[in-house]
């Protein structure tokens, strides 16, 4: 409701400025054009009106884009919630109405558990996005071996997608790099980062993680690389925005809320770090570079 009132205000402002521009132009014709004072006044008001119209147009365009992103987010969340619920209901109805062989029952239970995990993941992602936006949120800061945090995150993602151990590789050589942070929050960030890498990989999932000393003093670099479908150059600066999802050909098959990378950036930023993305183009994989301060 507040956004709608703001949009209406700027729309009315644009109409008023347009009416004022017409009135000034008519007055300009009717009055003596040779008067210097009127000339200066007319130029000033005309510049003021043009500035107002430009700002108003920029605001309206941003509001339209934001509204489209919100609609896309609602559609994505609705799909991510409705699909697993419908699947679980179908399997439960089947188990209730028919005699199912024990082997099939086990298969049904596995599918329902996977759908439950998907449902829980969506809910947790929405809640995480809400929590990261809270400036007053308290962090339990401790000293952490960042490689071990990433290993825990990788185990969660492997379990979520039933992946082999080698699908996400976190070399033990990266251990021993200590950061100060909230273990749960950092794990949430890297779970989202690895989840994103898996979703945008091809059928043969290969994700590599590298942890090393940064070229900057008292910093640690974490590289998360996938060999998937890549990101177009035009989208590289926008992937961390809330609700933004890359929509480009093959990416359309990937489902999500558009919150994962927003959560990653918010958490890393609150820990005094930075995150950026690199990709050589479509079909050439993606590398996320996280930089955190050393404890």
Image (tube, helix red, strand yellow):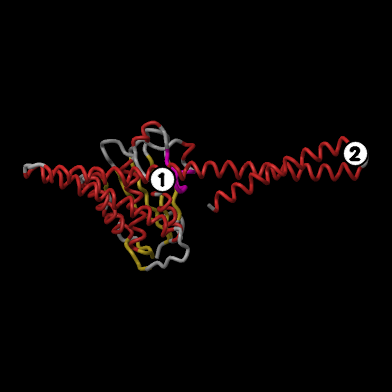
7 over 133 or under it: above or below: above
* Mark 2, secondary structure of its residue: loop
Residue 192 x/y as whole percent: 35, 50
Q: Which one is nearer the viewer's eye here, 251 or 126?
A: 126
Residue 243 forms part of the magenta stretch:
yes
Residue 175 x/y as whole percent: 30, 58
The magenta segment is 238-246
Residue 293 x/y as whole percent: 43, 61
142 vs 274, left or right, is left
Q: Give me the disc on residue 74.
A: 1
Residue assigned mark 2: 31
Q: Residues within 10 Å of mark 2 (few under 14, many from 20)?
A: few
Give the farthest residue toward the top. Answer: 249
Q: Which one is nearer the viewer's eye here, 44 or 188?
A: 44
Discs 1, 2 touching: Cβ within 8 Å:
no
Q: Which residue appears at 36% of the width and 53% of the height?
A: 125
Residue 268 x/y as whole percent: 42, 57
* Mark 1, secondary structure of its residue: helix
Q: Give me the disc on residue 199.
A: none
Work out whether mark 1 precedes mark 2 in sequence or the reverse, and give the earlier one. 2
């Amino acid at each position: 409701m507040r956004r709608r009132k703001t949009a209406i205000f700027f729309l009315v402002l644009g109409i008023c400025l347009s009416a004022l521009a017409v009135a000034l132009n008519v007055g300009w014709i009717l009055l003596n054009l040779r008067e210097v004072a009127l000339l200066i006044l007319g130029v000033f008001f005309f510049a003021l009106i043009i500035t107002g119209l430009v700002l108003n147009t920029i605001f309206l365009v941003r509001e339209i884009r934001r509204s489209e992103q919100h609609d896309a987010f609602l559609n994505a969340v609705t799909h991510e919630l409705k699909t697993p619920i419908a699947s679980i209901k179908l399997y439960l109805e089947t188990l209730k109405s028919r005699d199912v062989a024990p082997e099939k029952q086990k298969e049904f239970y596995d599918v329902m558990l996977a759908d439950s995990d998907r449902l829980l993941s969506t809910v947790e992602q929405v809640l995480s996005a809400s929590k990261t936006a809270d400036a007053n949120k308290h962090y339990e800061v401790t000293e952490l071996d960042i490689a071990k945090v990433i290993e825990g995150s990788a185990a969660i993602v492997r379990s979520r997608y039933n992946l082999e151990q080698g699908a996400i590789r976190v070399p033990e050589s990266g251990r021993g790099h200590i950061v100060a942070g909230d273990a749960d929050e950092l794990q949430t960030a890297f779970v989202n980062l690895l989840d994103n890498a898996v979703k945008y990989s091809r059928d043969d999932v290969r994700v590599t993680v590298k942890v090393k000393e940064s070229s900057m003093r008292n910093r640690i670099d974490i590289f998360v690389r996938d060999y998937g479908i890549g990101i177009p150059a035009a989208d590289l600066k926008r992937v961390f925005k809330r609700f933004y999802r890359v929509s480009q050909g093959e990416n359309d098959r990937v489902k999500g809320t558009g919150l994962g990378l927003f959560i990653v950036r918010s958490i890393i930023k609150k820990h005094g770090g930075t995150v950026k993305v690199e990709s050589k183009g479509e079909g050439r994989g993606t590398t996320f570079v996280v930089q955190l301060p050393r404890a």
